[in-house]
Image: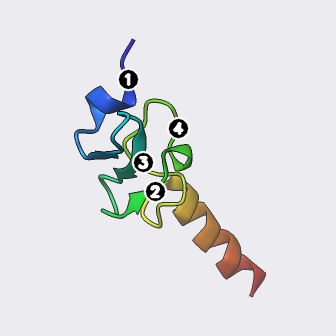
Amino acid sequence: MTTVTALIPRVRRDHHGRAQAIRCTTCGTWRKPYRFSRNSVTCRRCPYGAVGRHTATYAARRR
């Protein structure tokens, strides 16, 4: 099984080895690990990902 650590080399760890933050490959921001799906490299809140595009489309339709 592939771990997030193997997929994303940009992980900030604390002195116990736990991931504290992961850098999104699309938007480049550091986010908490719970913002990522298990094997993804882009965050769920990414404005350039599928969720961000869906949110922007939804907001544009509501105006």
Mark 1: amino acid: Thr
The earlier-in-sequence mark between 1 and 3 is 1
Q: Give yes or no for contact between labels 2 and 3 (Cβ–Cβ under 8 Å).
A: no
Expressed as whole percent of the image width and height from the top left, the position of residue 62 reads: 77, 80
The residue carrying mark 1 is 3
Numbered label attached to residue 37: 4
Q: Using the image as rendered, state which of residue 55 and residue 3 is in the foreground.
A: 3
Mark 2 vs mark 3, foreground winner is 3
Mark 1 vs mark 4, foreground winner is 1
Q: Give yes or no for contact between labels 2 and 1 (Cβ–Cβ under 8 Å).
A: no
Q: Is residue 42 above or below residue 17?
A: below
Expressed as whole percent of the image width and height from the top left, the position of residue 49 reads: 45, 56
Q: Is residue 21 left or right of residue 61?
A: left
What's the residue at 65%, 80% (across, down)? 60
What's the residue at 40%, 40% (across, down)? 19
Mark pair 4, 2: CA separation = 13 Å
Mark pair 1, 4: CA separation = 11 Å
